[in-house]
Amino acid sequence: MNAVLLKMFGQERYITDADGKAEFVVLPIEIYKNIVDFIEDYGLGAAIREAEGDKRYNLEEALNYLDDEN
């Protein structure tokens, strides 16, 4: 299990509705930041894996491609 998730157990707080049903979770800011970083890293990794078969450009080609798009 991810170390961030292990640190989180027991530190979360809940905001409930009038019936006592949890509607929101409140986390310490450092745990929240770690979770956001983890999700961003996961998404970046997925994007890299998805693009592995795509054509690669050197710097000059990439800049020309970007200029052509604008």
Image (cartoon, rainbow, N blue to C red):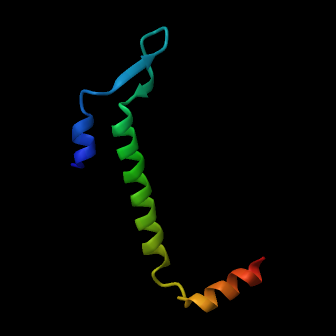
State the image coordinates of residue 30 (x, y, percent, origin top left). Answer: 35, 38
Q: Where residue 63 sits in the image (x, y, percent)?
A: 65, 84
Q: Residue at x 24, y 49 (%)?
A: 2
Above or below — where is 41 with respect to 10? below
Instruction: Pinpoint residue 65: horizontal percent, then vertical percent.
Output: 68, 85
In the figure, 14 relative to 3: above or below? above
Whether residue 21 is situated above or below residue 41 in the rendered picture: above
Say which residue appears at 24% left-offset and 32% top-offset: 9
Q: Is residue 14 above or below residue 56?
A: above
Nearest to the observer: residue 59 or residue 11: 59
Image quadrant in which the C terminus is located:
bottom right
Give residue 59's quadrant in the image: bottom right
**Which of the 4 image quarters holds residue 14?**
top left
Residue 66 x/y as whole percent:
69, 80
- In this orientation, which residue lies closer to the viewer: 36 or 52? 36
Q: Residue 1 vs residue 56: left or right?
A: left
Residue found 21% across the figure and 40% down from its top: 6
Foreground pick, 20 / 15: 15
